[in-house]
Image: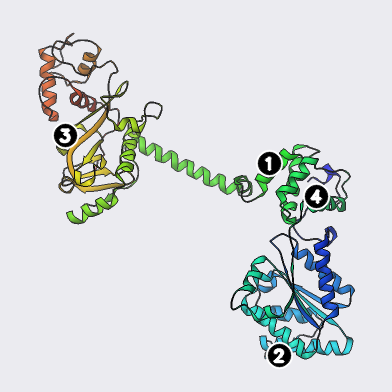
Amino acid sequence: MYLQTFGLREPPFGDAPDPRFACLFPREREILAQVEYEVGATSSSVTLVTGERGIGKTLLCMLIEADAATHGVRAVRQGAGDYALETVAWLRALYAGFGLPLPLSADANTEDHLVDGLAAGLGRLTHHVSHRFLWILDDAEALSDADLAIVNRLFVACEKAGAPFHIVLAGEPSLSERFAEAGAPALVARIRSRLPLNPLNAEESERYVRHRLHVAGTTQMPFSRLGLRSLRDDGKGNPRRLNTLAHRALERAAERGEKSIGERALGFVVREALPQHARYWLRRFRRPILAIGAMIAILFVGGAITWFLTGHSPSRPKNLVTVSPEQALAKFHDALPEPEVGKVRVWGELLARWQVTSKETSVANAINCDATIFAGFACVSGRGSLDQLRRFDRPLVLELDDANAKQQVLLVGAGDENVRLYLGGKYVELTRDAFQHVWNGRFYAVFRVDPAMPAKLSRGDRGEGLAWILARLPAPVGGAAAQPATFDGSVETRVRALQQRFGIAADGVVGPETMFALSSLEADGPHLARGVP
């Protein structure tokens, strides 16, 4: 606690209103004087006091209640906690507050009987001892229209009984707005005085802080000149806000062993103590946030592991196989994003599966499908069938027909009957027959290759590119043999066999499509999903 650090007898900036710390300015004095005049000079009155939350209405109501007792006025103050009870309960509380005996019979404990009995009892007291009565309704914005109707009935009944009955309604500005609307409660017509409680100005805010510190017994001013100015500005003339900031500033200074609180320290406090700053929520709900953060981290790590181990997103694809082909294609079209948006997402997903980072290339650059996207990473495009692409066993970008505005999707799984596609936001499964109605046969594929690999290799060539090819070509028929130093007839024969296996034109020349086929023989890198029927 900061009391010893700053020589204080008690906390000066508590949350609960305390009349001992009341710092009255002209507007509070005017309201007190106006209520005193209404209670003393008129037979009955209704006064409305409004101000924003935390402006000091409850403290003012406590002062009005205390001042009434010094002038021989019986006062009862009620708040939101009382209105939360049943109406009968807070009407019975008025009996006790004004010193009237409670009705004992069950029949007399209804709203109508309690209102009439209360007015009659106050009338008798007035006749015998000349008392005046003041009912202070704090947090009046919490009163329902039905409650306000009962308040009005009691006011009218007391007038008829000859009892000097006065009401002070204290509430937020929304209460005034509610009274100004059409169909407002009848009590509105009886309001004699409307007294706004405005925020403190800059000078009053500083005086307010100094006054509370003085009452708490400080021997030194804990705020520097700039710190006090910052507190004044951030407090925005609201006493509750000033209390919150000042209290937290004193706590923080004591924790850090500081004797003077400056502008910089107040900046930290504002971010910690006011709800519009993220630091406030982190400080208030630190443990739940840490627990939620840990859970999110676990889920993220688990999802990432699933992603890299399976080669596809853990999102469950939407199954369009079980519906008719017409319904499946209709739902497929509805699921497609805007073409440009979908293209970026699809290529981004493809690069992510190959674990290509933004430092190596951008999605926009990859979409161009240049022969070499960056050193060691190539792209190839062409036309083929689903059976051919299935043999490549790599995720590929497929271009839809012209009727679908050049949409692109990512093939992530292919079976005998169905295909699994990523549409740029969601995964779907579709029958092969249905998909072939919207696919024009064009595909785009990316793959890793030796950076020294030339664009094309054919018979008679040699070099590092040849070594990359020989390391991936299936062994010749009859077992392993010594690797040739040049691209000779034996290599050409093996290349033709590979091309026939993958449905590529068997010309014996290693071009982009053949390089892609060789790359697909590697275990590394993403592959088409298993388990697609």
**Picture quadrant of residue 16:** bottom right
Q: Position of residue 291 (x, y in %)?
A: 54, 46
Q: Which residue is mark 4?
A: 206
The one nearer the camera, 271 or 515, is 271
Choose the circle earlier in sequence order: 2 or 1: 2
Q: Neighbour class for label 2 at 10 Å: few (<14), some, many (≥20)?
A: few
Q: Which residue is mark 1?
A: 268
Q: Examine the rendered structure and indicate whether residue 8 appears above or below residue 355.
A: below
Q: Do the residues under discs 1 and 4 have CB atoms within 8 angstroms?
A: no
Q: Do the residues under discs 2 and 4 have CB atoms within 8 angstroms?
A: no
Q: Neighbour class for label 1 at 10 Å: few (<14), some, many (≥20)?
A: some
Q: Which residue is mark 3?
A: 383
Instruction: Report the mark closest to the observer, 3 or 2.
Output: 3
Amino acid tagged 1: Phe
Instruction: Report the mark closest to the observer, 3 or 4.
Output: 4
Q: Position of residue 47 (x, y in %)?
A: 75, 74
Callout 3 secondary element: strand
Q: Which residue is mark 2?
A: 105
